[in-house]
Structure formats: structure tokens, C-alpha cells
Amino acid sequence: MQVFQHMAAAFYLAAGVGAMLGLTLPSQRILRGARWGLALGALAQGLAFATLHRLASAPSLTDLPQALAVMAWLGVIFTLALLSRFRLPGFVPPLAFIAFLSVFGATLSTPGLVAERDASGSIPHAHVLLASAGFAALGVAALAGFFFLLEHRALKRRRSLARRFPMPSLEALDRVNRVALVLGFPLLTLGVVTGALWMKARTGAITGGSLHEAWTVVAWFLYLGLVVLRFGRDQAPRQAAASAVAAFVFLVFAVVGVGLVS
Amino acid sequence: MKILLLGMNHRTAPVEVRERFAVAQAGPLTRKLVDRPEIGEAVLLSTCNRVEIVATAENPDAAQHVLLEFFARELAEGALPSGLSLSELTYLKHGRDAVEHVFRVASAIDSMVVGEPQILGQVKDAYRESADAGACGAVLSRLFQRAFATAKRVKNETGISQRPVSVARVAVDLAKQIFESLEDKSALLIGAGDMIEAALVALDDHGLGSRRVANRTRAHAEGLATRFGGTAHGLDELDRLLPMSDVVLSCVGGESPILTRDRIEASLSHRRGHPLFLIDIGVPRNIDPAVHEIDSAYLYDLDDLQGVAAANEEERRRESERAERIIFEEREHFDGWLVALQAVPTIRDLRRRAEQIRQAELRRYAGRLGLDPGQSEALEQLTRGIVNKIMHAPISRLRDETDREAGLARLEEARMLFALDDDADETNEIDGGSGGGMRDATRVPSDAASDAESDS
């Protein structure tokens, strides 16, 4: 499993460096190579996961480094699907480096024991997978929002970024943001529900009163508001982009940051 | 075989002169040119910015006169501009310079607008016409194939053709940074002048969905709308048309802006946040600059577009330095090929000379040795093996030399050392049974010199 993880990390790193180089030169050939690197990294990571769960001493997905690796993997797969439809070369470097760091972090972390198969059954893994998928999709929405804000600012200053880097159009970024939100919010909702079920199976109550739970629920409401604004009130693309970035920062804090500061 | 090029372009001759030399059908003329004994192969390129002939010839001086005469008689049909000589209007390039020039032209480095995409197609057409007319042989075919490959490398490896430099193309480029595709977009064109038409052509090239032309004089709008498959409107319909439009392009006369901030804000309220791209190429400006402050409105005026175009042109110039390096590499490769090609006759002569000597020596000793067929065959193989082994190193060195100057010098030396240009004398010597031939060529220099003296 370690071999596949190392391979995935190497592919992601190569994809990130290649994409940076491809954007700077700029060279379409190198950018295509970077996309392949990302795809090979995702494949290697998939094989790592497949072999991981055949082991008797498999690390639990509920370990934070493992969960982050899953999130990055799902984010890469989601982005690869988007790349087949949209011109989004700027997405590859940040995503590849995030994926590299998360996979590398997972290889360094001491694996915990397999999540105990108690009354909760496979709910912990379902929770991690669903929440990770939602997290990854909303991360892509935030990335699209971030690039939208950059390009919008440049166009308003009459200094298009596309003159230096092959940037996607504002319309494409807005559509990616929209699609990612449509996908990410239901997954996040399912992640929250399975989290509550897991807690109920363990403690008998749907909430344990931890900071992580409280902040995640606030983040979920934040996203609910964002969905209502976006699809019910025709929120303008720039506001939607800014909201996606702000909401994701909040979500990252709720999922990862709270655990670190508490 | 030498390559030479005679041409005139936008730098050496004004358009009123260039148009006299322009030709529509290059094929028959190139055929006519290669029918002259001084010219081996020829390609004639005629575009609005240049007229050039690339040719091969054994004697470049004679060929140069033929090309100048061809320019004056066949292209200009004797009607040269008064007070100007052809040598002032044209440039002549030989060898490496000619090769490099062809590569630069095909790669659009030599174009009036550096990096423009049309020239490569025009060079391909010129080559095809020449090939169809039977005026293109191995050397020019190779030269033009390398020119196309060079142009492809320049396009792929540099950003020379990526940035538009005309106002209309810059506007389209900006539109593509806002919209993913123009195919489902609608443009509103306010005005019906040349600038609007140029922008419409550029937008159409990118598959614009629909177009509406609004003008004070509706009849003018109808003319443009009919040509480009749009609808014509009066300026009084602007408020109705604006919410339906994604791109607004305006170039009409008038003292005050016709599109104010309030007007645009009102139209955007119907667009559910969809962006609106406005291009104002009118002087004085037709659109209130405050429109750019609206969140989903992006307004660019003529100065902005010209600023982007100038920056792009500067960028292209920087990229052309990278292109020059590619052209240098490709020219070196082509030179290597040309030297190898020029080595072919020398290698052939060298092999023939060695074979003649071998055959002559075998004939001389065949009767004296009294060999049976088996022994004759063995001797045949033995001598052939010896000759091949001796010839292998010099032939390899002649063939593999890629540096042009060194290669040509080596060819000269080989011809001199093996006396390849003195066929008649050497053949007599070989057949005359004097024991000379190759053996003489391997003597020390002093012996060879005394032989030469005795011959004279």
C-alpha cells in the first residue's frame, strides 16, 4: 500500500510542478502532461485505498490524515471530471500540491486501528467518505470562486490574467462553482447525517456536544443559506464566488481547525 | 546545387509597387522559370505583403540574372515603376540566408504583423502550386517541409501567435475571457461603420450566436445585418435590446454617451446577474465610463483595447527572440541535410573509382593466375571486402559531416585526393595497366608531386 501511496505522492508532485511550469512558459504540452500526472496520481491513490482495506491492520479512515487524503483524492477525481469539460489549467497546481501534501501526510502518520465494528457498523466509514466527498466538491467550488475573483479583479483593472496564464473564462468558473455546490451540499448533508447516526450508535445521542460538531452544523447552515441565495435568489456570480470562498474557509476551520485549536 | 532567393516585401517596396508584381497563379510561372537551364527548382510566393522566388541553381550568378529578368519581364510585365530600379526594391539572399529567410517567412516572424496566422497557409499554397507544376524537386521540397515544421514548432513552443494585436481581435479575446463560448451569445452592434464591421467579422470567426445591428439610419443597419445574417433596429429600441445582449459594441457619432450607467443598470436587472461585455470604440465615447463600476458589466474603450493590443505586440516581439533560436536550430539541421545531399555525387564517384580499380586489377591478373571458378569467386569476394573496408571510413566521414563549411571543404578535399574530377586520365591509367590508380593516390606527397610533374 505504501508503494502506491508513494507513487501517488510522486505523481501529484510532478503534476503540480509540471502545471506550474506549463502555466509559466506557457506550454500546452506540459499542461497536458500535468493532467496525466494528476490522473496517474489518482489511479495510484485508488490502488492504495483498494489494497489498504484488504489489510488486517488497516488504518482507519476516521484518522484525520487518512480522511484528508480521501478528501484530496475525491477532489482530484472531481476536478479531472471537470477538466474534461472546462478549460481549467489553473486548478491543477493548487490541487496537485494539496493532494501531494495530504497523501504524503497520510504516509507519515501512524496508522490507527481499524474502526471498531460496533453497533455503528460501517457508518464511520460512510460518514468519512460522504463528508470527504462533500468537502472536496465544496473545495473545488471555493477554488473556482477564488479564480473567479482574481480574473474579475484583473478585468476590472483592465489587466487580464489570461495574458500571462491560460485562465478559464468567468462563465466557466461560475458554472464550475455552481456544479460543485449542487454536488457538494447534498454530500455534506449526508456526511452530517451519518455523523449524527455514528454518534447515536456510540453514545445514544445524535450529538456529543463537541466543538467540531457545533461548528460543522454552523457551516452546514452557512452552505444552506448559500444554496438558497444561489438558486432561489439568483445571486450574482461575483457574490457567489466570494461566498463560496468564505464558506469553505469556515468549513475548513470547522473540520480541521477546531480540532487543532481546541 | 545552391539555394537563392529574390524578393520584395512591405519593407522594401510600397503597396503600389508590390501590387504590380503580384500574381494570382504561380504554378505556370514557376514552370516557365525552371524551363530555363540556369534554374533547377523554383517556388513563387505572392501575397499582399511580399513577392518572393526561391530557386536552386548550379551557378548562382547566372541564376540571379535570370531571376531579376523574370521579376521585370514576367511579374511586372515590363512596367517597372519609374525612377526606381529593381535592385532597390528587392533583396537577394544566398545559401544559409535564403534558407533562414524562408523559415522566418513561414513562421510569420518576417510578417508585417508578427505571428499572423495566414502566412503559413499562403506558403503552403505556393509550395503546392510549384509542386503541381513540376517545378519543385528534392531540395526545395525538403526546404519547404522543414519550413512548415519550423513554423509548427514556433507556434507550439512560443507564444508568438497567441496574443491578438488588432483592436477587433483583442475585443473578441476579452469576450472569451468572460464567456466560455460565443456560440450561445448575442451581440448588439450600435453603429454600422467599418470598425463595427471589422469587429463583427472577428466575432463571427468565433461562432457568435446571434447579432443585432442598431443604427440611427436604419437602412445602413439593414445593409450590415443582411450581410452578416442579423436583424436591423433603430436606436430607439436599445432599451428593449440591451437585456437580450451579452456583448455590446458601440461606434456611433454623438456628443454625449448614449449608454448611461442608469440605462445599463436597468438592463442588467433583467439579466439575473449574467455578465455584460461592452466595447466602446466610438470617439467621443458612446458609453458612460461609470458603467465599468457595475459589478457584472465589463467596459473597454478604444484606448483600453489599443493598450492591450500594444502590450500583445510587445509580447510577440519578445517571443520572436525565442522563435529566432528555433529557426537557427532548424537551419542548422537543414544545412546538415544539404551537405549530406551534396556528398552523394562524391560518394558515388568514390565508390565507382574504387570499383574500377578493383575490376581493372582483377582483369590484369585473371589470366596469369589460372584460377578455377571457385578460386575466382573467392578472389572476387576478397578484393571487394578489402575495397569496402578501405572505403568505409572516408565515406562515413563525408556522409556524417553536419557542419556546412567543414563538410564542403571535406568534399573538395576528397575529390582532389582521389582525383575524382579527372575521370578520363584516371580511367586510362587504370585500364592502361601502368599499375597506377589507387596505388598512386596512396603515395607520399613528394612522389605524387613528381608524378604530376612527369604527366605534364
Image: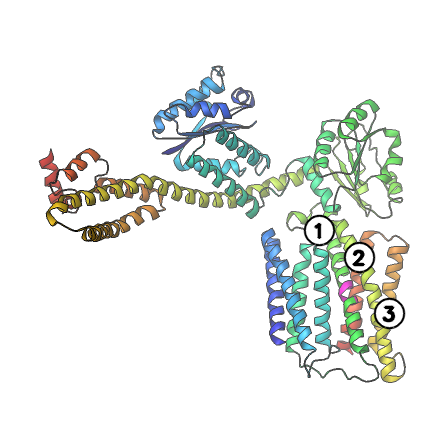
The colouring scheme, among rainbow, by chain, secondary structure or one colour, is rainbow
* Label annotation for residue A168: 1
Cβ atoms at labels 3 and 1 below 8 Å apart: no
**Residue B283: percent from left, percent from top:** 75, 30
Tag 3's secondary structure?
Answer: helix
Q: Name the residue that disc number 2 marks.
A: A179
Q: Is residue B148 above or below residue B371?
A: above
Q: Name the residue that disc number 3 marks.
A: A218
- The residue range painted magenta reads A134-138
Mark 3 is surrounded, within 10 Å at the Cα level, by few (under 14), some (14 to 19) or many (20 or more) other residues, namely some
Q: Chain of mark 1?
A: A
Q: Is residue B379 left or right of residue B45?
A: left
Q: Chain of mark 2?
A: A
Q: Are callouts 3 and 1 both on one chain? A: yes
Q: Chain of mark 3?
A: A
Question: Marks 2 and 3: which is nearer the front?
Answer: 2
Q: Is residue B333 above or below residue A208?
A: above
**Residue B355: percent from left, percent from top:** 23, 44
Q: Amino acid at mark 2?
A: Val
Residue drawn at point x = 50 percent, y = 32 percent: B127
Q: In this view of the protein, can residue B150 be seen by the observer?
A: yes
Q: Is residue A41 above or below residue B265?
A: below
Tag 2's secondary structure?
Answer: helix
Q: Amino acid at mark 1?
A: Pro
Given residues B143 and B100, the one toward you in this image is B143
Q: Does label 2 or label 1 sit earlier along the sequence?
A: 1
Cβ atoms at labels 2 and 1 below 8 Å apart: no
Q: Does label 2 or label 3 sit earlier along the sequence?
A: 2
Q: Amino acid at mark 3?
A: Val
